[in-house]
Image: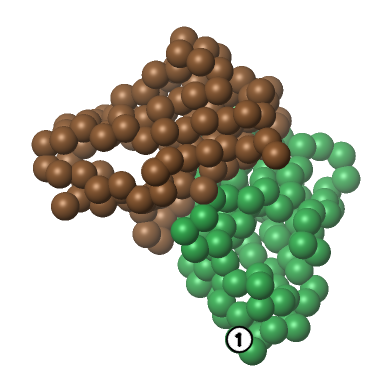
Amino acid sequence: DGGITQSPKYLFRKEGQNVTLSCEQNLNHDAMYWYRQDPGQGLRLIYYSQIVNDFQKGDIAEGYSVSREKKESFPLTVTSAQKNPTAFYLCASSIGTENQPQHFGDGTRLSIL
Amino acid sequence: AQSVTQPDIHITVSEGASLELRCNYSYGATPYLFWYVQSPGQGLQLLLKYFSGDTLVQGIKGFEAEFKRSQSSFNLRKPSVHWSDAAEYFCAVGAKSAGNKLTFGGGTRVLVKP
């Protein structure tokens, strides 16, 4: 079945450590997105990519970095510069045209030790 | 910039009763509108979408939504809720000028009483 796979489901970070969240899709979608979700809040866009080797900052990009070397993969690195990284992170993808819905993975929950 | 407001943070409804979730958006032109549902610890699942045409759209799991341009609203409804409908619901708006970026509302958590 086609879909979006996020791994790991749970991740723990020590102070001062960078961690990378994986997102892989086999839907042949051009566009991919990373969102952050905090308790009781909606989704906030971190980064998005509409094509391989290109990506743009979203609303809360500070302290995060991404790469898009392959169409299927869009990993997110949470750097030590992100002072409040504890959150639920969701990856999504879409065909890439304007009115198409985004499809979501099951998320990664990141916590600080 | 586009924005989405879901005025109700929590709604409690009895099983078998009807449900209506409110969504108001702010955008100058015709937006693209979506409703998603999220179960605890899971990703978001698309319930339905509106792009153009008939303002009453049908979705999965017995949900429907009505686009009202004059009220800038896209409310979600279900005639009879089931215990499995307990979840968090998000309204989202996209816009032609924003490429395929979506702006999400803060969500409404639905609790279903037996």
Which color was chain A given? brown
Q: How is the image coloured?
A: by chain
- Choose between B86 and A75: the one closer to the eye: A75
Q: Is residue A111 left or right of residue A36?
A: left
Local SS, label 1: strand
Residue B17 image-quadrant placement: bottom right
**Quarter of the rendering occupied by the N terminus of chain A:** top right
Residue A17 image-quadrant placement: top left
Which color was chain B given? green
Q: Residue at x 64, y 65 (%)?
A: B21
Q: Residue at x 41, y 55 (%)?
A: A41
In the picture as drawn, the residue positioned furthest to the left comes out as A16
Chain assignment, label 1: B
Q: Is residue B55 left or right of residue A48?
A: right
Q: Position of residue B84 (x, y in %)?
A: 66, 72
- Considering only vertical position in the picture, is B99 above or below A106? above
Is the residue marked by circle 1 packed among few (<14), some (14-19), or many (20+) residues within 10 Å? some
Q: Is residue B38 left or right of residue A35?
A: right
Residue A51 seen in this snapshot: yes
Q: Position of residue A51 (x, y in %)?
A: 55, 14
Q: Position of residue A44 (x, y in %)?
A: 42, 42
Q: Position of residue A45 (x, y in %)?
A: 43, 36
In the picture as drawn, the residue positioned furthest to the bottom comes out as B114
Q: Residue at x 68, y 43 (%)?
A: B33
Q: Amino acid at mark 1?
A: Lys
In the picture as drawn, the residue positioned furthest to the top comes out as A53
- Choose between A21 and B12: the one closer to the eye: A21
- Residue where numbered disc 1 is placed: B113
Q: Residue at x 82, y 51 (%)?
A: B57
- Choose between A12 and B5: the one closer to the eye: A12
